[in-house]
Every structure is written in structure tokens, then in C-alpha cells.
Amino acid sequence: MTNSKQIIKRIDDLIGKFSNPADPSDVETLREWRKEVEREMLNDSIRETPSIKLVVEKLKDDVAEMTYLLNHAKSQKLPDTERDRIIDKKELYLWFLGIFAGNDKVIEEIEKKVKVEEEFFEQNKESYIS
């Protein structure tokens, strides 16, 4: 994973540089990016705890069983109401697993956006320096 602390520092630097923007939403967007990075850092630390690892493995096994059942059970053995219940349960488990899956892409995308903003500031810094 990209060094999240460095990205937060770069975002904070940009917030300081854009402290008097013509459009205050610029700073708000930077703050939102910072929150996303912090959230991913928190999820990353939680993801490494033994109890969460145990829960994640159990849910992965359950999802695999549900997938097999949904793909192979005949309609006579698995009525529609039961199939719907399994589908709902599987979607819930997948949502929960998604929280702990780790999302390097989120951090990478924010890092790309930060780089664009840094380049923009360098090209237009005369407009921001009073």
C-alpha cells in the first residue's frame, strides 16, 4: 500500500496552499480525500487483528458455500424463498467483506488526484500567493 501518511501530509500541504481559494469547495474536496485516506488507514489496521481475520475467513467460507449451493441446487431442493434468503445473506456478507478487503485503488486514485492538484498549484501559484 502506498504510504498513506505521506499522502495525508501532501493533502495537508495543499490545504495550506489553497487556504484562500476562489472556490472554497477545493479545500472541502481535499478534506474529503484526507478523510478517505484516514478511513482506509483505520480499516488497514483493523484488518490485521486476529479476530477480524478469523471473522473474514469464516465469511469467505460461508460465501463460497452459498455460491456453490446457488449454482448447483435444483429448484426442487431449494425453493425460491430459500434461494432469495441465501442471495440476500450472501450480498450482506460480501458487503461486510468489502469493508475489510483493503482497497489500494482508493488510495492510488487519491494520490493521482493529489498529484494533479500539486501540479496545478505549481503552474498557478502566483494566483494563490498574496
Image (tube, rainbow, N blue to C red):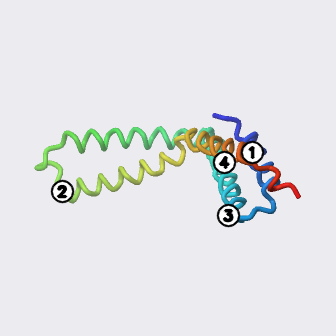
Give the distance between the C-alpha atoms of the residues marked 4 and 2, in whole angstroms: 42 Å
Disc ID at residue 25? 3
Mark sitting earlier along the chain (2/1): 2
Mark sitting earlier along the chain (4/3): 3
Of residues 108 and 1, the one drawn nearer to the viewer in this rendering: 108
SS for tag 1? helix
Circle 4 residue: 37
Give the distance between the C-alpha atoms of the residues marked 2 and 1, in whole angstroms: 61 Å
Q: Nearer the viewer, mark 4 or mark 2?
A: 4
| Location of residue 3 with respect to 74 vertically, above or below | above
Characterize the local packing of mark 2: few (<14), some (14-19) or many (20 or more) Cα atoms within 10 angstroms. Answer: few
Q: Residue furthest top?
A: 1
Give percent across and percent down for residue 27: 72, 59
Amino acid under disc 3: Ser
Q: Nearer the viewer, mark 1 or mark 3?
A: 1
Circle 1 residue: 123
Q: Nearer the viewer, mark 1 or mark 4?
A: 1
Amino acid under disc 1: Gln
| Location of residue 26 with respect to 114 vertically, above or below | below
> Do tag 2 and tag 1 residues touch (Cβ < 8 Å)?
no
Mark sitting earlier along the chain (1/4): 4
Circle 2 residue: 80
Characterize the local packing of mark 4: few (<14), some (14-19) or many (20 or more) Cα atoms within 10 angstroms. Answer: many
Q: Nearer the viewer, mark 2 or mark 3?
A: 3
